[in-house]
Image: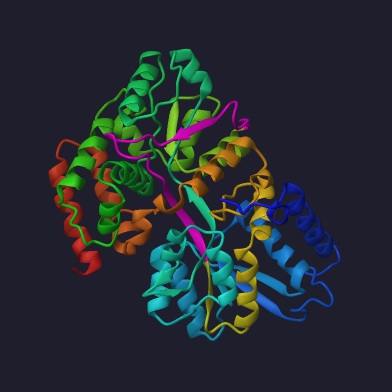
């Protein structure tokens, strides 16, 4: 919720003005166009993160706005996918970045336990506390100390569909329950187009399917317990969720091309199967970023050629809101930690988020970001849904797990859910295998 009053009313023009100022400064001929006379003039902040391509380009626009505001130069250093190894080697070599954008809760927790992080300044924590739901502070804290400011978020409870396919099949309404979702999928299949393109080659997509079903069916308390391995994967609630997921996996009407085709389909290809030139399915479940691919790669107009609806409630539970995100942290061993903390104070406010919102491909969990800053109604609706979820948001469970269980290709949860997609006939056996791998990874 935003505070009332015109002083908090921010529009897309605010973001545009900040961006124009930053880009104007860039044109002056320096890397980030330092503003003369700013409080950090002559200082440099080094930021590391996994972002490449358009994400990196758009984040640099945020850094440019910080430069325009403070006078600090910024340098962005791509970390590659293995952020932990990258940062560890930089610290060991005496060349640590000042700020790291941590892409997973597990990474943030690891850094904190290694003693690498500075706690957030009072200013950053105060600003974040007034604009982020408490759950984001929880995910950014370790043992009661607030280290990580969540800046960029993903909404991983969105089902994307081709409206033309729905119209052709006679599906008049977006599903409001999981049972309705399967019913709509079978109606689509009867009209000649299977329901779901499933990216089974990428195991992380299967973990997201499980997490949405589990969060809705079992509830947030058990979700949290399972995420911390305080609840075993052999629990009846896990078996029930796997049974529910198995109903989808075993139905060739629902899985485009059947399980074998799904196991050979990566995530970008799953989006192409719905929104590409030769569609093979009517829906694809994944995060808000599906819309960006449909728009940028296949020329779809969001809200017309590509739409989404919230992942529906399962068995009478609440509709799930699973999220992911990137948290900004300041390293103790960086050469300019004070200026790095100033960057986090900037990122905590709405202006920084509105710059990227205007550039596209971005969602903010910050309730003070004006929805008008987003470039289209579909992204606006997604952002509104994420913020409105408040404390009911739950972070991607596999991102909270040790990488050996929740984040390694061909191993742990990714592999076992691929095996389950291939043969979903034994949910109890699958749960036992998941528990065995989890126990090894968590060390309990």
Give whichever of 253, 169 is nearer the camera.
169
Residue 356's place in the image compared with 172, above or below, is: below
Is 12 placed left or right of 116 in the picture?
Answer: right
Residue 430's place in the image compared with 87, above or below, is: above
- Part of the protein shown in magenta: 299-327
**Residue at point 44%, 42% (across, down):** 267
Question: Is 311 contained in the magenta span?
Answer: yes
Q: Is residue 25 visible?
A: yes
Quarter that holds the C terminus: bottom left
Residue that sits furthest to the right in the current view = 28
**Residue at point 24%, 49% (across, down):** 416
Q: Is residue 32 visible?
A: no
Is 229 placed left or right of 142 in the picture?
Answer: left
The quarter of the picture where residue 312 lies is top left
Question: Is 214 contained in the magenta span?
Answer: no
Residue 434's place in the image compared with 441, above or below, is: above
**Residue at point 56%, 62% (across, down):** 130
Question: In the rendering, at what x and y percent does residue 57 appear?
Answer: 67, 56
Q: Main secondary structure of the magenta part?
A: loop
Question: In the rendering, at what x and y percent does residue 88 appear?
Answer: 46, 78
Question: In the rendering, at what x and y percent does residue 109 appear?
Answer: 39, 71
Is 207 placed left or right of 34 in the picture?
Answer: left
């Amino acid at each position: 919720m935003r505070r009332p009053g015109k002083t908090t009313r921010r529009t897309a023009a605010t973001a545009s003005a900040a961006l124009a100022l930053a880009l104007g400064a860039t044109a002056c001929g320096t890397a980030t166009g330092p503003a003369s006379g700013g409080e950090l003039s002559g200082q440099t902040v080094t930021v590391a993160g996994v972002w490449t391509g358009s994400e990196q380009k758009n984040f640099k626009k945020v850094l440019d706005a910080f430069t325009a505001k403070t006078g600090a130069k910024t340098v962005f250093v791509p970390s590659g996918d293995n952020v932990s190894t990258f940062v560890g080697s930089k610290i060991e070599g005496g060349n640590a970045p000042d700020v790291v954008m941590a892409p997973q809760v597990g990474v943030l927790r690891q850094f904190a336990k290694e003693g690498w992080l500075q706690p957030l300044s009072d200013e950053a924590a105060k600003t974040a506390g007034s604009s982020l739901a408490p759950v984001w502070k929880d995910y950014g804290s370790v043992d009661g100390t607030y280290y990580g400011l969540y800046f960029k978020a993903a909404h991983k409870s969105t089902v994307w569909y081709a409206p033309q396919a729905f119209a052709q099949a006679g599906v008049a309404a977006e599903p409001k329950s999981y049972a309705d979702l399967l019913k709509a999928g079978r109606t689509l299949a009867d009209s000649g187009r299977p329901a779901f393109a499933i990216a089974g080659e990428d195991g992380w997509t299967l973990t997201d399917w499980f997490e949405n079903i589990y969060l809705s069916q079992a509830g947030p308390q058990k979700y949290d317990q399972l995420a911390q391995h305080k609840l075993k994967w052999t629990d009846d609630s896990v078996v029930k969720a796997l049974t529910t997921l198995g109903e989808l996996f075993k139905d060739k009407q629902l899985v485009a091309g059947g399980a074998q085709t799904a196991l050979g389909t990566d995530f970008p290809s799953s989006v192409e199967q719905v929104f590409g030139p030769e569609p093979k399915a009517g829906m694809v479940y994944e995060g808000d970023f599906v819309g960006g691919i449909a728009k940028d790669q296949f020329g779809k107009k969001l809200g017309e050629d590509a739409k989404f609806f919230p992942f529906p409630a399962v068995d009478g539970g609440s509709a799930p809101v699973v999220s992911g995100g990137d948290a900004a942290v300041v390293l103790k061993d960086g050469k300019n930690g004070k200026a790095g903390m100033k960057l986090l104070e900037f990122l905590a406010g709405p202006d920084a988020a509105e710059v990227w919102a205007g550039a596209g491909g971005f969602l903010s969990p910050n309730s003070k970001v004006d929805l008008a800053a987003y470039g289209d109604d579909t992204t606006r609706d997604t952002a509104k849904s994420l913020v409105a979820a408040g404390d009911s948001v739950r972070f991607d469970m596999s991102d909270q797990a040790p990488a050996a269980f929740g984040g390694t290709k061909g191993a742990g949860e990714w592999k076992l859910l691929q095996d389950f997609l291939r043969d979903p006939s034994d949910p109890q056996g699958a749960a036992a295998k998941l528990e065995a791998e989890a126990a090894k990874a968590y060390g309990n």
